[in-house]
Image (spheres, helix red, strand yellow):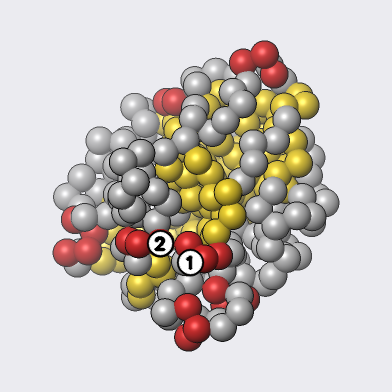
Amino acid sequence: MAFVLPWAMNGRPAPVTASGPDDAPPAADGSATWANTLLAHRSSNEHSSSGNRVDDLWAHKNSHLWLYTNNLNNDGGLAGNGNHYFTRDHRIAVVRPHCTEGTCSAYTTDWSAVSQITAPGDVNGDGHPDLVTVENDHLWLFLGSTVTGQLSEAHEIGTASWNGYTITSPGDTNSDGHPNLWARNKNSGVIYDFPFGTDGLGIGTAMTNSAFTSADRPLLASPGDADGDGIADLYTITDDRELWANMGTAPDASGYRLGVHHIASAGVLWKTVTNIA
Ligand SMILES: [Ca+2]
Ligand SMILES: [Ca+2]
Ligand SMILES: [Ca+2]
């Protein structure tokens, strides 16, 4: 199952089923399950990839990338689609675009090298939401397009050591009109806030202490601003399989900061979750 978590104002989610296993991207043996699928979702300030006002879902599995358009905007709506947000009738196989910037000689022609995906929003300011991947230790930016689920070109934006980080998309944390990227150093446990320019990353600033190692917080994602105070927040799943929240606090002179954690949920659901986005 895949779940969608409507964030309450107290930062505590109430999961509802977003998609059943039959709708998941197929694995190599043809079976379908959302387990161990890479997920990402974030619209631009104007629209989603399909041109609507709610997020679509990018899903990567078995060397394929899919875009599931949100059934809130598809024929029949939620009720006509089994009350699920994302169904296989409304998914599109995303064609790998051409590389136009960076080390294109190392660019694979398919999606097989992807180890992480995140949807930052609209990096280059054309109104179309974009996608970022980690591939072979490098970071790639894929620009969105006018065609639902299709990406126009690929730019290499980071050339080393990205396998050591977990990336997630908080939105525009420094209010410069471009989204930011949060990157967690898996070993040191420090999270960095990177500003995007129109095409590429600026210098990252450490925004936490060392509490966020991949051993202690195996899964990590920002939903953007969950509690409506205008400041992006972070959710993690701990090694004890609880969902913890660190709400963003007003940036100080050194940059962005997260508050102390609280336990958002210690329910049994989190013991079986393989990814959050
Ligand atoms: Ca864009
Ligand atoms: Ca920004
Ligand atoms: Ca917040």
Q: In this view, does 20 lie above or below 176?
A: below
Q: Nearer the viewer, residue 215 or 122?
A: 122
Mark 1 → mark 2, Cα distance in angstroms: 7 Å
What residue sits 70% from the left and 44% below the top? Answer: 151
Q: Is residue 94 visible?
A: yes
Q: Mark 1 points at which residue?
A: 86
Above-or-below relation of 23 to 122? below
Residue occupying the point 27% across, 54% down? 273
Q: Please state which of residues 226 and 113 is positioned toward the viewer in this rendering.
A: 113
Residue 180 in view here: no
Crowd band around label 2 with a 10 angstrom C-alpha radius: few (<14), some (14–19), many (20+): many
Tell me where residue 1 appears, x and y as whole percent: 31, 63
Q: Residue at x 26, y 66 (%)?
A: 265
Crowding around mark 1 (Cα neighbors within 10 Å: few <14, some 14 to 19, many 20+) is many
Q: Which of marks 1 and 2 is in front?
A: 2
> Which quarter of the figure has residue 244?
bottom left
- State the image coordinates of residue 175 (x, y, percent, origin top left): 71, 54
| Side of 207 where 261 appears, left or right | left
Badge 1 amino acid: Phe
| 259 relative to 91 in the view: left or right | left
- Tag on residue 193? none
Q: Tell me if label 1 and label 2 are in contact, CB under 8 Å.
A: yes
- On the image, numbered disc 2 is attached to which residue? 23
SS under mark 2: helix
Q: Is mark 1 within 8 Å of ligand 1?
A: no
Three-letter amino acid code of the residue under disc 2? Asp
Q: Earlier in the sequence, mark 1 or mark 2?
A: 2
Q: Classify the position of the C terminus by image quarter.
A: bottom left
Q: Is residue 45 above or below residue 36?
A: below
Residue lying furthest front in this view? Answer: 30
